Structure formats: structure tokens, C-alpha cells
Image (cartoon, grey):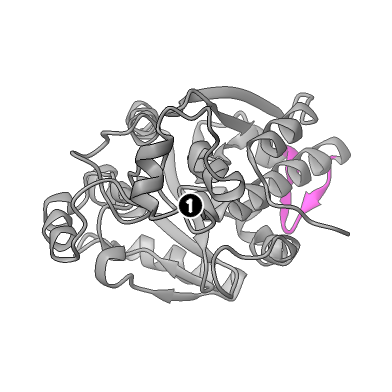
Amino acid sequence: MEHHPVDYKALTDALKTMTGGAVEINVLTRSILGREIPILTLGQGKRAVLYVGAHHGMESITSGVLLDFIADYIKQYERAATVYEYPIKYLFQERRIYIVPMLNPDGVEYAIHGVGAENPLRDRVIRMNGGEDFSHWQANARGVDLNHNYDAGFRAYKKKEAEAGITGGAPTRYSGEYPESEPETAALCRFLRLRRENIVGILTLHTQGEEIFCSCGDNLTAKTMSVGRVISRFTGYRLARPEGLAAFGGLTDWCIADLFRPAFTLECGKGENPLPPEQRPLIYERLRRILFSFPCIV
């Protein structure tokens, strides 16, 4: 079977096929360039978790993995199947899974298709990028790395950012003028704050390295580490701590520090980013059990 990168059209086309009582589709917000960012809901329970894909433009394979999970969930729901030890009807009635498959659609479009002549930011972002090859672009439409735009060690990160010579919009690592300066991250944080009593765990999918990050200073709890070990056992990924610039400003860090919720970054797949689309089914196979089980173990 031939696999293709998941661009914004592939995302919206896939969502059009996901109908029926198992899934609800809404809009989280719009991106810098006006693209709707979908958020899907599976299940009706009060106890909820959140899965997020494609913070980074060149990591759209994570969007494909989450689309595979949604389609799989719907299929199992229609069959009234038991998935691992969980009857899907129980999972649907007693748990709720929120999914943002593609938080950064503008960055994904840059990474896959480049920057078109119609883009009002074209000249600016080409200068940021140092050319017209955007295949390694991670940031959003105006050069802010969304996974450094959360209020978790933001001031400390700013110092390290300056030391690294990052002074403004860039393909990666620029954190923005202030936390949640971008509509994508601001909307996601707003969503989490409004539902903080119900959301009990967060998974963020990135690539690559087959590692699990769940560190935020000294704010790790025994439960977070316990759940992390289960995730490691189910996926075969190893628990690790992010180092250097990767250790600041991420969604996982913010959820642990600000919301006091177990949160994990899954670095999916192996190889050099952007990972080839052919890895998508292999990644989903490794993550399938935890994506179905996480709402019940967290």
C-alpha cells in the first residue's frame, strides 16, 4: 500500500469520512492563515484525556497516526468489540478522548508544499528559512515554534534562545514574544483550562527516537512516573528526559507544571525527520494499545 504525507487536504478529506455516533467533530480555532483546526471527541464519559499531533510542520505523520486511531475506534465501536481488555462500549460511555490531529496546519503545508505566491508572509518566511526548501520547517506560519510557546520555563528558555542566536521568527526553536502568543497554542490552553476538572491526562505525539518524555523540573508525581512506565511497557519506547532547548516550553511541561496533570511526549518512529510516510502503520501498531488504554490507566 502506498502512503503519502498527511497535508491539510488529506486531514479534512479523512474527517469527512468519519461520521456516525462514535465521533463528534468541532473546531478548536483557526490558524494564523485562517485554516480551521479540528478537534474530535470520542466517547461521552466525564473522565477525559487529550491527544495532540503535529505541533511541528514536518511531523505530520503524527496526524496520520491519530487519524488511524480515530478510524480504528469508530470501526471497533460499530462492531461493539472488545479492544485489549476494554469493551469499546464501556470506553465510550465511561471515558472521553479529545483529539487535535493537526495543531499546526500552516506549518504542515509549508513543510509539504512550500510557501506559495499567494501567501502574504512569503518573503518574510523565506528569509527566516534561508531559502525555499521548507521540508524541515517546524514552526507555524510566522516562525513561532508552537511547542516552545507554552508558559513552562519560558523566561529561562528565552535566555537559552538568545545564547543560541535565535532572535526572531525561525524554522524552529523560536518561542514567540510571550507564552501563548499564537492562536494555536492559546486556543489549546484555553480548552484545557476550561476542562481541567475533567481532563486527567495528555499525550502529545512528536517524532522521532521512540522515547517518552515526561519531565518538568521537580513536578513529577509518583502517578506520572507509574503511568509512564506503563506507556513504556505498552509501546516499547524508553522513558527519557529532554535535554537542552528541548527541555523548555512544551505542552507536556506546561500540563504537568500548571494543570498538575500527567502528561507525556511520545517521540514516535526512528530515522531522520521528516520520517517517511511508510512508517505510519508501523508507528500506529506500536501506539495502538496505549491510545486505547490511556483513558483507563491515567
Instruction: Look at the image and say whether residue 82 sits in the magenta stretch.
Output: yes
The N terminus is located in which quarter? bottom right
Residue at the location (74% across, 43% down)? Answer: 73
Q: Picture quarter containing residue 140?
A: top left
| 292 lies left or right of 17 | left
x, y percent for residue 191: 39, 29
**Does residue 88 belong to the magenta stretch?**
yes
Identified by mark 1, the residue type is: Leu
Residue 298 visible to an observer of this rendering: no
Say which of 251 and 79 sits in front.
251
Residue 267 visible: yes
What secondary structure is marked by label 1? Answer: strand
| Image coords of residue 24 (percent x, y) | 65, 25
At horizontal 54% and vertical 55% (from top left) the residue drawn is 59
The residue under the point 63% across, 55% down is: 61
Residue 246, x across and y down, in percent: 31, 64
Residue that carries the numbered disc 1 in the rendered image: 203
**Left or right: 12 with respect to 134?**
right
> What are the residue bounds of the magenta stretch?
80-89
Within 10 Å of disc 1 (Cα), the crowding (few <14, some 14-19, many 20+) is many
**186 relative to 280 in the view: left or right:** left
> Considering only vertical position in the picture, is 23 above or below 222?
above
| Residue 128 image position (x, y, % from top left) | 34, 49
Tell me what residue is drawn at x 44 percent, y 48 percent.
Answer: 201
